[in-house]
Each structure stands twice: as C-alpha cells, then as structure tokens.
Amino acid sequence: MEDADVEAAPRLTTTNYDGVMAEHHTAEILAAFRADVSPDAFREQMTWKRFWVVEGGGEIVAVGALADFGEPGAPNHVVSQFYVRADRHRRGIGRLLLAHLTGIARADAAERLHVPSSRNAVPFYEDAGFTVDDAQPDAAVEMTWMTLPLAESPPAPG
C-alpha cells in the first residue's frame, strides 16, 4: 500500500462495517471499530505493519496487512485490516490476498499465522485452514482469534 491509497482503504473498511459486519456485530462494537479507522490511523499503522492492496477497475477492492509482534528470528505474524469490498466477495480476491500474506509469513519463517476474525469471516478463515483458538482474549469485542500452522503444507483450495 502506498500513501496514495490511504484515503481509500479506510472507506473500504467502514463500508464493510456498515454492510456485512452489521449483520453479525452489535452497533456498539461497530462504533468502537469505526472510531479507530481513519487515514491518519492507517498512516500510523503503515510505520509498523506491512500493507497490501488489490486493485480492480482502477479502485482498491481489498486491503490486508501483516503485523509482526515477535522478535528478530522469531516472528509472530498477525493478519490485520483484512477487508474485501462487499460487492467483490466470493470472487477469490480474499483467498488470493490471504495466500499472499501467508506466503510472506512463511518466507519470514513464522511458525504460525494468527487472525482476530470478525464473526462473519470465521467461515472464510476456516476454509483457508485456520482453526479457532481455545483462548479468546477479545470475545468482549466480538472478535474470534484463529491460528494457521505454517509448518504444514498449505490447505487444498476449497
């Protein structure tokens, strides 16, 4: 993601909040999510996360990031800010972007990849091979933590 993309990425995110996620999350939680999404917040996150966008028809149709909370030589990657424009769901865009992020985590020698999933996206991540973690530290904010082991072969496309 480049600085020129920073205005569009938060709009794509909030569009998901208003659409698909509104069917699965409380209004209070969505309001809290929305408070943390702005071009300035994305710019700040770009200083410590690696972001990618997918473009289609001259527009950003998906965004995703990797955050590394590990130490040198022991990466601990987390998928972050992962959204596909709602009118582009079920076209393989999310699978391709997630495969790209997973490949980067593998190249960084991460042993696993984590994601705090919105309720509506749990089946998407399960199809990609993630499993729901036993511990759920963000249950109060309606997020489901999931993990994908990277030492194994990638799952077959579903």
Image (cartoon, rainbow, N blue to C red):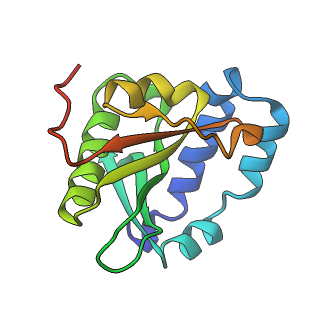
One can see residue 29 in this view: yes
Q: Is residue 72 left or right of residue 136?
A: left
- Measured along the vertical axis of the image, is residue 110 above or below residue 60? below
* Residue at (20, 30) in percent of width and height: 155
One can see residue 57 in this view: no
Q: Residue furthest front?
A: 134
Q: Is residue 52 left or right of residue 82?
A: left
Q: Is residue 61 left or right of residue 34?
A: left
Residue 35: image x %, image y %? Answer: 77, 55
Image quadrant holding the N terminus, namely bottom left
Quick one: 79 or 152, which is closer to the camera? 152
Residue 76: image x %, image y %? Answer: 40, 63
Residue 112: image x %, image y %? Answer: 33, 51
Image quadrant holding the C terminus, namely top left
Residue 84: image x %, image y %? Answer: 44, 38
Q: Is residue 123 left or right of residue 7?
A: left
* Residue at (42, 31) in percent of width and height: 131
* Residue at (39, 26) in percent of width and height: 126
- Measured along the vertical axis of the image, is residue 52 above or below residue 63? below
* Residue at (48, 46) in percent of width and height: 115
Quick one: 8 or 114, which is closer to the camera? 114
